[in-house]
Amino acid sequence: MEFRASTPVNKWLEVGLFAQHGRLSANERGTARNLNFQEHSDYGRLQLTYNFHQFLRPEHVVEPYISVGFEVLSS
C-alpha cells in the first residue's frame, strides 16, 4: 500500500507526506538448495520542496527545485 499527499504552502514552497507499507517474499525450491525469505517494511517521509518560483521569469521552461526532508524506515 502507498499513500502520497502534498500541498503548496505558497507559490514557492510545498510540503509533502509519503507512507508505504508492504511485504516482499520469495521461495526457491530445488534439488540443490531450498531458500526462502519474507520481509515486512514500513516507510514514511515528510518533505519540504522549494522551487525558486520568485526568481524565475513567467515564461520559464525549466523549473529547478531543492527538497529536504525526514525519512523513517522499519523492516
Image (cartoon, rainbow, N blue to C red):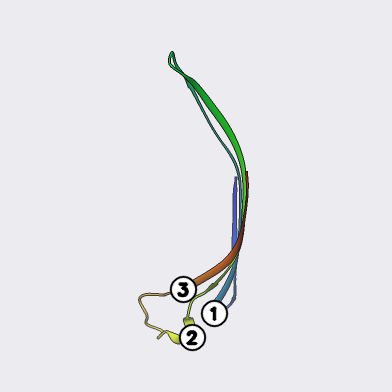
Q: Which residue is rendered at x = 49% and y = 73% of the image?
A: 66
Of badges 3 and 2, the one in the foreground is 3
Q: Earlier in the sequence, mark 3 or mark 2?
A: 2
Q: Which residue is rendered at x = 42% and y = 84% of the image?
A: 56
The residue that disc 1 covers is 11
Picture coordinates of residue 40 (x, y %)?
62, 39
In terms of secondary structure, where does tag 2 sit?
helix
Q: CA distance from mark 1 to mark 3?
A: 12 Å
For residue 56, side relative to residue 13 (left or right): left
Picture coordinates of residue 42 (x, y %)?
63, 47
Quarter occupied by residue 31:
top left
Q: Earlier in the sequence, mark 1 or mark 3?
A: 1
In terms of secondary structure, where does tag 3 sit?
loop
Which kind of residue does numbered mark 3 sit on?
A: Tyr
In terms of secondary structure, where does tag 1 sit?
loop
The residue that disc 2 covers is 54
Picture coordinates of residue 68 (x, y %)?
55, 69
The quadrant of the image that shows the N terminus is: top right
Q: Nearer the viewer, residue 71 or 54?
A: 71
- Which residue is at the far front? 32
Q: Which residue is rendered at x = 59% and y = 41% of the image?
A: 22
Is residue 44 placed above or below 14 in the rendered structure? above
Which kind of residue does numbered mark 2 sit on?
A: Gln
Picture coordinates of residue 60 (x, y %)?
37, 80
Q: Which residue is rendered at x = 52% and y = 69% of the image?
A: 67
The residue that disc 3 covers is 65
Is residue 56 placed above or below 38 in the rendered structure? below
Instruction: Assess whether mark 2 and mark 1 are in contact (beta carbons under 8 angstroms).
Output: yes
Instruction: Assess whether mark 2 and mark 3 are in contact (beta carbons under 8 angstroms).
Output: no
Q: CA distance from mark 3 to mark 2?
A: 12 Å
State the count of labels: 3
